[in-house]
Each structure stands twice: as structure tokens, then as C-alpha cells.
Image (tube, grey):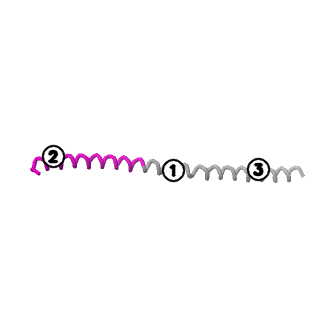
Amino acid sequence: MEAKERDKLLIEMYGSVKRIDEKLDNVCEQTKDHRERIKTLELKPGKRWESFVSGIIGAIIGAVVAFFTKR
């Protein structure tokens, strides 16, 4: 293999590695975004449950207060 052929091959390989690196960076950014979205989705049911429990507790307290005020 001549030096020119070897140099050409090395330049092509460098270009390929550079494109792979750019694509890998893009995948890493997308992974971070997906991770944040998943965390947000995981927290939603917890917030709904807290709202539900607060509503039930409020209704029970309201019923108890109404019961004692009518007596």
C-alpha cells in the first residue's frame, strides 16, 4: 500500500469516526431528554394520588364538621 493510498484511507476513516462521534453526541442528548420526560411521567400519578387523598380528607373533615354543627 502506497503512502497516498494509506493517507486517503486514514482521512476517510477520520471522517467516519467524526460522523460517529457526532451521532453519538446526538444520541446522548436525546437520552437525557427522554430521561427527563420519564421522570415527569413517573411523578404525575403521585401528584394525582396526593390530590385525591387531599380531597377525601377534606370531604371527611367537612362531613364531621357538618355533623357536629347540625347537632
Magenta segment includes 9: yes
Residue 22, position as x, y percentages in the image: 31, 46
Closer mark to the observer between disc 3 and disc 2: 2
Q: Nearer the viewer, mark 3 or mark 1?
A: 1
Q: Is residue 33 rendered to the left or right of residue 17?
A: right
Foreground of the two, 8 or 48: 8
Residue 59, labelled with which disc? 3
Q: Residue 5 location, x and y as percent?
A: 13, 47
At horizontal 25% and vertical 47% (from top left) the residue drawn is 16
Would you call the spot at circle 1 few (<14 residues within 10 Å), some (14-19), or many (20 or more)?
Answer: few
* Residue occupied by mark 1: 38
How many residues crowd around disc 2 within 10 Å: few (fewer than 14), some, or many (20 or more)?
Answer: few
Where in the figure is residue 53, as x and y percent of width and height?
69, 53
Which type of secondary structure does the marked residue at label 3 adopt? Answer: helix
Residue closest to the eye, 18 or 56:
18
Magenta region, residue range: 1-30
Residue at 44% in and 47% down: 33
Residue placed at 28% from the left, 46% from the top? 19
Residue located beneath label 2 in the image: 8
Q: Earlier in the sequence, mark 3 or mark 2?
A: 2
Is mark 3 in CB contact (under 8 Å) with mark 2? no
Secondary element at tag 2: helix
